[in-house]
Amino acid sequence: MTSPILLTGGTGTLGSLVIPLLRDAGRAVRVLSRSSHEPADDVQYVTGDLVTGEGIDRAVRGVETVVHLAGGANGKGDEEATRNLVRCAAHADVRHLVSISVIGADRVPVGYFKAKLAVEQVVAGSGLPWTMLRAAQVHDLILTLMRTMAKLPVIPAPGAIRFQPVDSGEVANRLAELTLGEPAGLVPDLAGPEVHGMADLIRGYLRANGKRRLLLPLPVPGKAGRAYRAGENLSRAGASIGTLTWADFLAARGIGLPGDRTGTGVTTP
């Protein structure tokens, strides 16, 4: 009998999309979660906490492949959580550790990116066979950001910051493919087909929802500003590029971009 695949972050945006793909491939799935869940659709849940280390030994028992998708919104605690996971995985003789990171983890001197780089280094130094996918921010995250910012009476609009958002379903498909394959180390980045300035994203979202807000141009100083202006968080040559645009994503949720079906971005080469 094939051993189950363990997922951390299995109840999140990406994890909830990866699970059915693995199930469709005939693989049993186990999810490590801080909350208790009843088994559903042949998915087993093990209660545990990556930060404290509680329950991880039980979760990795009998597992050959681990997909590590768990992470905090700001990356805080992710390095220690990953250390706890790889320590238990090594003791359990896990043969493949798949992990998600962010494009620019090694180039953008900002806390979140630094935290993701630290996680990458823990995985690469674990002694386990591993695969790492760096992806751009998913559309769902950008939408959450836009909704949050639209609640402000005055919205800061850093001109240096651009995004290349990618569809979460396309990231999940790639993760499932990598999980079912052999360990491959650091694989090509995955980003969306368009680059959007933050100010353009905000304006488009406000127009689509009939909202009016004052946008306050905001410089990004120092090393972080130089990195964003240089596009260090964007894809480079050799990256894999998705097909679903920001406008496609919004349209699927009943949100249109007035007068611009293709969105406010610039298509990348």
Image (tube, rainbow, N blue to C red):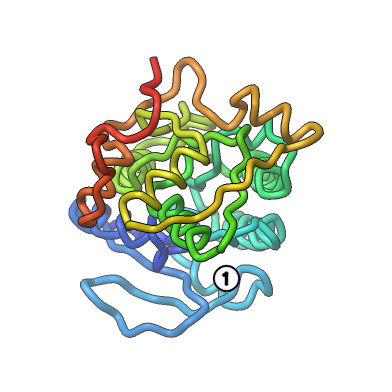
Question: Quarter-wise, where is residue 263 in the image?
Answer: top left
| Drawn side of residue 107 relative to residue 134, left or right | right
At 18% across and 54% down in the image, what residue appears? 24
Q: Which residue is drawn at 46% across and 26% down?
A: 188
Q: In this view, does 43 lie to the left or right of 97?
A: left
Quick check: 224 above or below 73? above
Looking at numbered disc 1 in the image, what kind of residue is underneath it?
Asp
Q: Is residue 66 in view?
A: no
Answer whether residue 141 is visible to the viewer in this image.
yes
Q: Mark 1 points at which residue?
A: 57
- Please, what secondary structure does the residue beneath circle 1 have? helix
Near-viewer residue (268 or 158): 158
Q: Position of residue 49 (x, y in %)?
A: 59, 74
Quadrant location of the N terminus in the rendered image: bottom left
Where on the picture, by quarter, is residue 109?
A: top right
Question: Label 1 neighbourhood size at 10 Å, few (<14), some (14-19), many (20+)?
Answer: some
Measured along the vertical axis of the image, is residue 114 above or below residue 5? above
Question: Where residue 80 appears, x then y in whole percent?
Answer: 71, 60
In screen coordinates, is 44 left or right of 237? Answer: left
> For the point 25% across and 77% down, which residue is it?
40
Q: How many labels does the image show?
A: 1
Tell me if 177 is positioned left or right of 72 in this view.
Answer: left
The part of the image, by quadrant, that contains residue 179 is top left
Percent position (x, y) of residue 55?
57, 77
User: Of residues 261 and 118, which is closer to you in this image?
Assistant: 261
Q: Residue at x 33, y 41 (%)?
A: 246
Q: In which quarter of the image is the C terminus?
A: top left
Looking at the image, which is closer to me, 231 or 57? 231
Please tell me which residue lies in front, 3 or 86: 86
* Residue 78 rendering spot, x and y as whole percentages: 65, 58
